[in-house]
Image: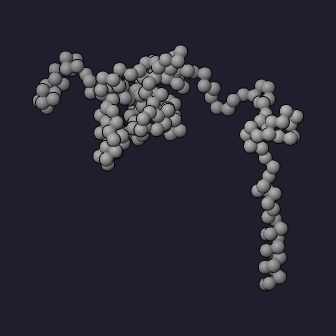
Amino acid sequence: MRPALIIAIAVLCWGCHLDMHDQAKYKPLSDSEFYADGSAGRSLPEGTVARGHPRTDELLFTGKIGGTFSNIFPFPVTETVLNRGQDRYNTFCSPCHGRTGDGNGMIVERGFPKPRSYHNDTLRAEPAGYYFDVITNGLGRMYSYAASVSVKDRWAIIAYIRALQLSQNVPYTRLSANEQRRVSESGQ
């Protein structure tokens, strides 16, 4: 038994080499004696094509047209888009902003500062691109959701926010007679 154990340990130790762990490598933008120009950073070979989708659609990827926030959506807002926006909003936004966008989410009940309501005049007047920028880059206490929420889902959330804003700010005269009666009965 002893000789077999000694041989097994010897074989295991013989297979472990630090040279696999400590390989020669260059850190980005470091100096190099190997290349004639002295730089470890190499240019991309001619004809290299970027992986993924090229970000050529300024509106889709920045919320801007010509560098200015746009109020145009990069794709049609359909019922499917609104349903997806509601789902993503409820998952990522409602803990802070509340289910109706009033800023009374669960975090406020836990003692955190209340975010602004989407129903105030200032935020209702902001273009859709502004919301896209805030979701992408964060603002104030809100951090970036770029890594958590896809580009198309960010736009779907914005479409849903617009629906929330419309639902809470419809002029009384635009309501049907039945809706006006319900509002009158509720005392609001």
Q: Which quarter shows the C terminus?
A: top left
Residue 50: image location, x then y, percent: 69, 29
- Residue 176 is at least partly visible in this image: no
Q: Is residue 77 left or right of residue 167?
A: right
x 76%, y 40%: residue: 30
Identify the image quadrant of residue 161: top left
Count of all numbered marks drawn on residues in the image: 0
Q: Residue at x 32, y 39 (%)?
A: 114
Residue 143 can be seen, yes or no: yes
Q: Nearer the viewer, residue 172 or 108?
A: 108
Residue extending furthest toward the top: 66
Q: Residue at x 81, y 57 (%)?
A: 19
User: In percent of the image, x 38 and y 29: which residue is there?
Assistant: 160
Percent across and percent down for residue 46 are 79, 26
In the image, farthest residue toward the bottom = 1
| Rendering quarter of residue 176 | top left
Residue 92 coordinates in the image, percent (x, y): 42, 40
The picture places residue 153, in percent across and down from the top left corner, at 47, 32
